[in-house]
Amino acid sequence: MSAIKKFRESLGQTQEEFAAIIHVSKVNYSKKENGKVKFSLDEAFLISNHFNQPIEVIFGNSEISKSETS
């Protein structure tokens, strides 16, 4: 299970709610959460800022692409 999924579930939030935070569809968010597509650094910052948590706590080390931006 991905770190972001564990974080989301620990808050009792849905994929739809997290998708809204980063302005993507639920389908696109699901692909990101399941590791098929990496989160962009901008998306990571949006989630981090929304929950006031460090990116490392939310994502671990391997789910963010530094070269991608939204």
Image (tube, rainbow, N blue to C red):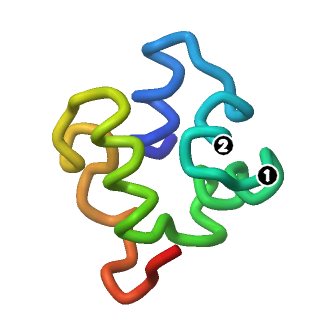
**Farthest residue in the bottom direction?**
67
Mark 1, residues whose alpha carbon is within 10 Å: few (<14), some, or many (≥20)? few
Label 1 sits on residue: 25
Q: Earlier in the sequence, mark 1 or mark 2?
A: 2
Q: Which secondary structure lies at badge 1? A: loop
Residue shown at 19%/48% (left/top)?
Answer: 56
Q: Position of residue 1 (x, y in %)?
A: 51, 41
**Left/right of residue 25 with respect to residue 67 in the rendered view:** right
Residue shown at 39%/65% (left/top)?
Answer: 42
Q: Position of residue 66 (x, y in %)?
A: 31, 80
Check residue 64 in the rendering and tell me which mark sits there, or answer none: none
Residue shown at 65%/28% (left/top)?
Answer: 17
Q: Nearer the viewer, residue 5 or 43?
A: 43
Q: Is residue 12 above or below residue 47?
A: above
Tell me the amino acid under the disc marked 2.
Ala
Check residue 19 in the rendering and tell me which mark sits there, or answer none: 2
Mark 2, residues whose alpha carbon is within 10 Å: few (<14), some, or many (≥20)? some
Q: CA distance from mark 1 to mark 2?
A: 6 Å
Q: Nearer the viewer, residue 19 or 37?
A: 19
Residue shown at 45%/70% (left/top)?
Answer: 40
**Left/right of residue 57 with respect to residue 64 in the rendered view:** left
Q: Position of residue 34 (x, y in %)?
A: 63, 54
Q: Which secondary structure lies at badge 2? A: helix
Q: Position of residue 53 (x, y in %)?
A: 21, 32
**Left/right of residue 26 with respect to residue 52 in the rendered view:** right
Please give the count of numbered marks on the rendered protein: 2
Query: Which image quadrant for residue 41?
Result: bottom left
**Farthest residue in the top direction?**
12
Do the CB atoms of the residues marked 1 and 2 lie less than 8 Å apart? Answer: yes
Tell me the amino acid under the disc marked 1.
Ser
